[in-house]
Image: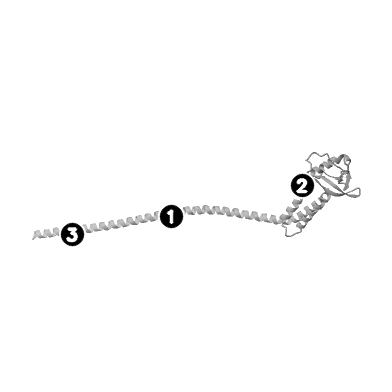
Amino acid sequence: MLKKHIVFLTMLTTFVAATEMEQVLEVGRDNTELSAQSQSKIDATDSATEKIVNEFKVVSKQVEGLKLYNAQKRIQIQAQLDLMDKYDEQLVQVVVMQRQIPPLAQRMLEGLEKYVKLDSPFHIEERMQRLDLVRASLSNPKVTASEQVRQILEAYNIEAEYGRKLDAYDETIILDGQEVVVNILRVGRLGMFFQTKDERQTGYYDHETGTWEKLSGSYRVQIRDGIRMAQKLAPMDIMMLPVVYSGDAS
């Protein structure tokens, strides 16, 4: 009977030990599972943290780029504002200049007209017509200020060109109280000379008296050759012409 009890106790002890072992193993398995879950959560957290850090780095770079972009834009905007201020000042100056142009052009025209009247009497009709056209332009509100300035400057340039050209043309002059058709030779603004069609009479224009005066026959050939050169009927060559001062021809 005692042996049976001992065997029963041994079996009971073994069963209890097995049960306790099973419980320990179960706890171990649970701990392992919990550990695996924790590690998985840790790994997921690390991955999420790394993703957030990477996103933060990307956003930080974008923010730095935006800061630089905004700084450059601020510089550009300020430069544009400064340029606008400069244009505003220039616009004010342009308006002031536009107001000054008409009276200035009018004074220039009056000065040029006086000059033409005091100048040698060549192409008078043509020159006065040009001045009349400029005068009409200055009084026309449809003509811009720039066009008015262009026309008055063009008139000045044409007058300046007269002083650099050799010119010959027909003209009717008063000689010895009579109208005579003659050939005119104009050497820039140095002198104006005439020669009758039959080449018998040669002379010059006296600026002081405003009359045509005769020259000696010794200048007949020189004046004739000068007229031919101006008409492109003879090659250009040296001309020996008188220079007249105070009504004295030499």
Above or below — where is 219 with respect to 10? above
Which mark is nearer the camera, 3 or 1? 1
Q: How many marks?
A: 3
Q: Residues within 10 Å of mark 3 (few under 14, many from 20)?
A: few
Q: Secondary structure at mark 2?
A: helix
Q: Which residue is mark 2?
A: 161
Q: Quadrant of the N terminus?
A: bottom left
Q: Which residue is mark 3?
A: 16
Residue 66 image position (x, y, % from top left):
51, 54
Q: Residues within 10 Å of mark 1 (few under 14, many from 20)?
A: few
Farthest residue toward the right? Answer: 177
Which mark is nearer the camera, 2 or 1? 2
Precedes in sequence: disc 2 or disc 1: 1
Q: Quadrant of residue 138?
A: bottom right
Tag 3 and tag 1, C-beta contact below 8 Å: no
Q: Residues within 10 Å of mark 2 (few under 14, many from 20)?
A: few
Tag 2 and tag 1, C-beta contact below 8 Å: no
Residue type at mark 2: give it: Glu
Q: Quadrant of the C terminus?
A: top right
- Label disc, if present, on residue 45 of the rendered structure: none
> How far apart are the two marked residues, 3 and 1, measured between alpha carbons?
57 Å
Residue 176 image position (x, y, % from top left):
91, 47
Above or below — where is 17 with respect to 225? below
Which mark is nearer the camera, 2 or 3? 2
Residue type at mark 3: give it: Val
Q: Which residue is mark 1?
A: 55
